Image (tube, helix red, strand yellow):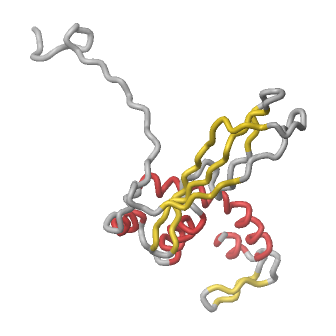
Amino acid sequence: MRRNGPWPNDDGARGFTRKRAERQTFPEHLPRERVLIDGPGACECCGSNRLRKVGEDVTLTLEVVPRQWKVIETVREKFSCRDCEKISQAPAPFHAVPRGWAGPSLLAMIMFEKFGQHQPLNRQAERYVPEGVPIALSTMADAVGAVCASLDPLLHLLEAHVMTAERLHADDNVLQKHTERMIEMI
């Protein structure tokens, strides 16, 4: 008995091609701040100062000055040595999150609102849309995870320092460091 519609191996079945995720583009209406990093003065390979510009790489970073959004364009010009043809370029700018799209102030604001003000990421994302900056919830969640991973070594250092105390005070209760109750709480 034949079913209505094509079977998976029939010629009438449509194939599925997964689209590659595109990097989020920033809204054009946001002000742009162009930061130019000076290129090398001499060739790194042979020391010649006969360099010519062959291009540039632009790193876009979404940044926020409290409730003033802007995109910072960091331009790194590329130069080619006329003597040895080696291409030289300044190093990429530092990002708090490797290959990140958000600046440090924006990351701090997202983290503070999430953990300090107890604002879920979906509410933050909803608030950014009327301001003209739609940020996907999954993108914000990835940023929060990356910041937490970056701060993990600091957490361990702080935890080690706190645990060296003889007593820990919490909720007006004094807990002895080596009691079983303390071990259960950790």
Query: Residue, x 46% and y 72% (percent of image)?
Result: 68
Q: Is residue 56 above or below residue 64?
A: above
Instruction: Return the residue found at the far bottom.
Output: 172
Whole-percent x and y of residue 148? 61, 60
- Which image quarter holds the N terminus? top left
Instruction: Return the residue found at the far right.
Output: 47
Quarter of the rendering containing residue 17? top left
Whole-percent x and y of residue 150? 67, 58
- How many numbered marks does the figure carry? 0
Q: Is residue 119 above or below residue 58?
A: below
For this rendering, which residue is in front, 177 or 67? 67
For this rendering, which residue is in front, 17 or 34? 34
- Which image quarter holds the C terminus? bottom right
For this rendering, which residue is in front, 108 or 48? 48
Task: Please give left or right for residue 13 compared with residue 185 in the image.
Answer: left
Whole-percent x and y of residue 143? 53, 56
For this rendering, which residue is in front, 65 or 143? 65
Quarter of the rendering containing residue 185? bottom right
Task: Please give left or right for residue 183 compared with residue 99 in the image.
Answer: right
Query: Residue, x 9% and y 16% (percent of image)?
Result: 4
Q: Is residue 59 above or below residue 86?
A: below
Whole-percent x and y of residue 80? 74, 34
